[in-house]
């Protein structure tokens, strides 16, 4: 959005500054969203792996014994 340049018009100057600030904020928000989209799936995958390890923390040897000596 470009308004006519008028050095004596404070309203035009204010609107131009507001517009520039909004564009800068949009750029920052896009960078935050990109970071979020790259980090959250990794965090979810790690949390799922930790939860899975807590559910069954037996060693592979224990699991083998269970399958061999099951009655």
Image (spheres, grey):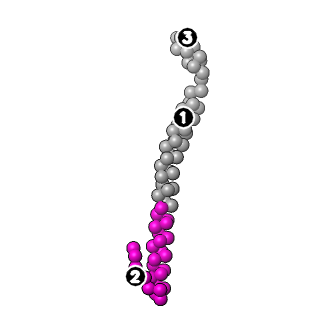
Toward the viewer: 22 or 49?
22
Mark 3, residues whose alpha carbon is within 10 Å: few (<14), some, or many (≥20)? few
Secondary structure of the residue carrying tag 2 is: loop
Which one is earlier in the sequence, the residue at label 1 or at label 3?
1
Tell me the residue at 46%/84% (across/down).
11
Cα gap from disc 2 to disc 3, whole angstroms: 86 Å
Q: Which mark is residue 49?
A: 1
Cα gap from disc 1 to disc 3, whole angstroms: 28 Å
Q: Nearer the viewer, mark 2 or mark 1?
A: 2
8 magenta-colored: yes
Q: Quick check: 56 left or right of 19?
A: right
Mark 1, residues whose alpha carbon is within 10 Å: few (<14), some, or many (≥20)? few
Mark 2, residues whose alpha carbon is within 10 Å: few (<14), some, or many (≥20)? few
Q: Which mark is residue 4?
A: 2
Q: Are marks 2 and 3 in contact (CB under 8 Å)?
A: no
Which one is earlier in the sequence, the residue at label 2 or at label 3?
2
């Amino acid at each position: 959005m470009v308004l006519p340049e008028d050095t004596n018009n404070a309203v035009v100057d204010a609107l131009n500054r507001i517009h520039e600030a909004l564009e800068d904020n949009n750029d920052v928000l896009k960078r935050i969203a990109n970071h979020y989209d790259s980090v959250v799936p990794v965090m979810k995958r790690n949390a799922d792996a930790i939860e899975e390890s807590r559910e069954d923390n037996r060693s592979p040897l224990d699991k083998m014994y269970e399958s061999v000596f099951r009655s």
